Amino acid sequence: MIVFAGLGLYDENDMTLKTLKFAKKVDKIYAEFYTSILTGTTIEKIEEVLGKKIHVLSRKDVEYEGYKIIEEAKDKDIMFLTAGDPMVATTHIDLAIEAKKRGIEVLIINAPSIYSAVGITGLQLYKFGKTTSIVFPEENYFPETPYNVIKENLERGLHTLCLLDIRIEENEKRFMTANEGLKILLELENRKKENVLSEETKVVVVARLGSLKPKLVYGKIKDLINYDFGKPLHSIIIPGKLHFMEEEALKYLCENI
Ligand SMILES: C[S@@+](CC[C@H](N)C(=O)[O-])C[C@H]1O[C@@H](n2cnc3c(N)ncnc32)[C@H](O)[C@@H]1O
């Protein structure tokens, strides 16, 4: 059997009791922290709660050698943990499909995810369009997808959740801040000039969701671009057309800058 379970968003208290229960029963626990991490805890603390060692896998281990875990799940009970929800903004569904194809029992245990947590701002899930990711630009690589997605969503009056790039490889550990994300969005406007965004555009920045003191800030890009949101992880929401309840929620639930 293979159990895909999420650890939630911030610390070791975010996982569900179901995850805990299965963690106690399985033979071995694997985890990956390259798609997202919990910044309010450590692997040691999570291991303490689970009462078991966690074998942390790299992107390469999962994407190129994931079949080894599935092989193991043929005659053992294996748990595979991720931050957030195991199937939200990850590619782990391919492992679940592969396991099913090989006749292995699959259980997916949901968890608090960035996707659900944006509701904390008062913005309605029904009003969100496509989600996008803002990635670190590289030499000769400045992806325009976030700009195009925001444009399409705004044309339909919909909000856009922008996930921010994470690089956790063997010799690299970088989390894009909301400040970097906003600078990239303005740079995209500067390159494309389609009047989608400007320094006057109002956005919502959310930081450390899942913690007891998340930071939720609503304001114009020009006022937030150098604002200190504290330690990661951060995400940005570009609101579309706001319902009056959403306007009220942004006013009362977020810090207005
Ligand atoms: C690939 S996505 C997360 C996928 C994860 N499986 C989930 O369900 O939440 C990673 C991005 O989500 C956002 N994120 C994750 N946790 C967050 C948190 N606690 N607060 C704010 N943003 C967060 C960040 O932008 C981060 O780079």
Image: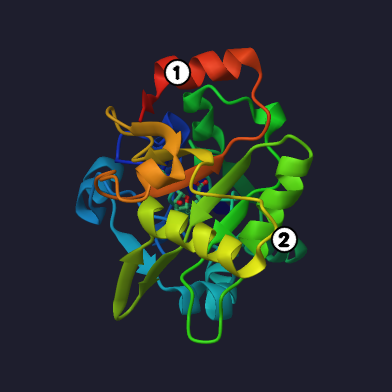
For mark 1, give the secondary structure. Answer: helix
What's the amino acid at mark 2?
A: Ile
Is residue 145 at least partly visible in the picture? yes
**Disc 1 residue type (three-letter):** Lys
In the rendered structure, the answer to whether residue 250 lies left or right of residue 106 reads left
Q: Report the residue marked by disc 1.
A: 251
The answer to whether residue 118 is above or below residue 137 is: above
Q: Which mark is residue 125?
A: none
> Badge 2 is on which residue?
97
Q: Which residue occupies 58% across, 44% down?
A: 161
| Residue extending furthest toward the bottom | 140
Query: Does dot 2 land on a helix, a strand or a loop?
Result: helix
State if disc 1 and disc 2 touch (CB < 8 Å). Answer: no
Q: Quadrant of the C terminus?
A: top left
The x, y position of residue 76, in whole percent, is: 51, 60
Tell me where residue 123 appears, x and y as whole percent: 57, 26
Given residues 65 and 34, the one toward you in this image is 34
| Mark 1 neighbour density, 10 Å: few (under 14) some (14–19) many (20 or more) | some
In front here: 135 or 190? Answer: 190
In which quadrant of the rendered view does residue 15 lie? top left
Q: Left of 170 or right of it: where is 219?
A: right
